[in-house]
Amino acid sequence: MKTIYKAAIAIVMVVVAVPFSLFFLYFPFEPNLPGSNVDIENLTWTNVTRINETTYRVSLSEDIIYRYKESWMHTNGNIPLLPDELPVRIRVLAGPLGGGVPYKYREVPFSENITLQYRHTYPYNSTFDLKAGKNYGIIVEAHWKEYFTTPHPYFGGVL
């Protein structure tokens, strides 16, 4: 009877160990690399001005740093490092405070294409209008794969 229990335990251990080993084989983890190669830091409101009874004009200031050329390589195979100049699109999304609204349905009060230099801080300001009487959750995003004003560094063409 003990041998049946030992065999069952061994089979369960193999059944559990195989999926874990396959997961770590196909999804290698590199703890020194962040998930994003562009950091947005020091996000602050610099000016809030009432335009009329229904609208405020707000200014948002942040530092954008292109910090890690190699951060995306562990998920994209053996593609070479990104170039020293990286074209990105900065988007400021506004939506109801607390979320609940998918990104594609959020207001896009501000969007602009810029080019970042590797390891240089890019002081960035955006000014946009928001409706009075609403509480907003503001999200600032940097997209470098989806939007380019110049050809893609590896695949050519303007996306």
Image (spheres, rainbow, N blue to C red):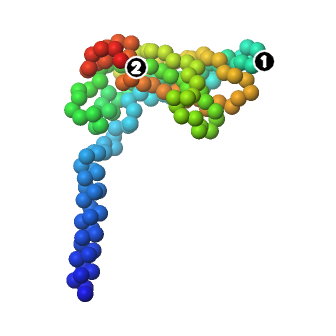
Mark 1: secondary structure: loop
- For the C terminus, the image quarter is top left
Is 120 displayed left or right of 81 in the figure? right
Q: Amino acid at mark 1?
A: Glu
Residue occupying the point 33% across, 33% down: 71
Q: Residues within 10 Å of mark 2 (few under 14, many from 20)?
A: some
Q: Earlier in the sequence, mark 1 or mark 2?
A: 1
Tell me the residue that label 2 is attached to: 147
Residue 146 screen position, x and y as percent? 39, 23
| 52 vs 141: above or below | above
Q: Residues within 10 Å of mark 1 (few under 14, many from 20)?
A: few
Residue occupying the point 24% across, 65% down: 14
Residue 155 screen position, x and y as percent? 26, 20
The number of numbered badges drawn on the structure is 2
Residue occupying the point 29% across, 18% down: 153
Residue 77: quarter of image: top left
Is 4 displayed left or right of 108 in the figure? left
Residue 80 screen position, x and y as percent? 23, 27
Residue placed furthest toward the right: 53
Tell me the residue that label 1 is attached to: 53
